[in-house]
Image (cartoon, rainbow, N blue to C red):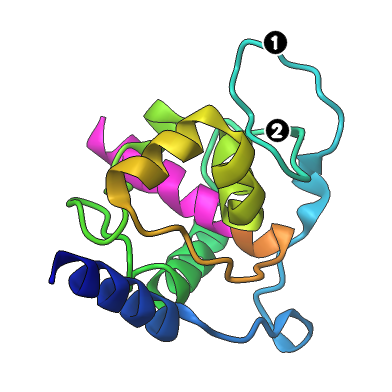
Amino acid sequence: MKLKIIISSFVICFLFSCGNSNENNNPNHIDSTKIVEKDTQSESVDKGIGPIKNVELNHHVDKEISAVGKTTFDSKCSACHKMNKRFIGPSLDLVTKRRSPEWIMNMILNPDQMVKENKVAKELLMEYISPMANQSLTEEEARSILEYFIENDNNKS
């Protein structure tokens, strides 16, 4: 019975969170030049596995990009994640205080490989049972979600 509930939860999460990316027609298109591909930080920081090697953060959150991130989060992620409570996936409240920006973006962009090869992602999979669905988001969409998380977390601390 428990297995049926877990499988049903995963199927529901996957079905409700699937969506099409339509960046070419998006008036809120985000400039991804703020994403830097060179690794300049210490290797001791867990950056995850994926295309993002380094993220340059501005001193202030870009509220316009954060708003796009909230919209993207609400449409593609909220079926499995809530900001302030555990759900199908972990709570994302204060996630930027627990994980590096690179790790967050790589988990969004590359969840399949992350749960196979990244220690933290493997531990999360073991705890939550349900793997994160790959939403096929662009780097720009992942960056906007990161900005949303940063703004949310800064408002809490």
- From the viewer's side, name the closer residue of 130 and 84: 130
From this view, report whether residue 79 is shown above or below residue 89.
below
Residue drawn at (47%, 38%) of the image: 122
> Which secondary structure dominates the residues rendered in magenta?
helix
Which quadrant of the view contains residue 31?
bottom right
Q: Give the alpha-carbon distance from disc 1 to disc 2, as whole Å.
A: 14 Å
From this view, report whether residue 54 is shown above or below residue 104.
above
Give the mark toward the camera: 1 or 2.
1
Magenta residues?
143-157
Name the residue that disc number 2 marks.
Answer: 56
Where is residue 76 drawn, in percent x and y? 46, 74
Q: Amino acid at mark 1?
A: Ser
**Circle count:** 2
Q: Residue furthest left?
A: 1
- From the viewer's side, name the closer residue of 113 and 38: 113
Residue drawn at (54%, 45%) of the image: 115
In the shown orientation, is residue 109 left or right of residue 69?
Answer: right
Q: Amino acid at mark 2?
A: Glu
In the shown orientation, is residue 57 left or right of residue 145?
Answer: right
Image quadrant containing the C terminus: top left
Name the residue that disc number 1 marks.
Answer: 42
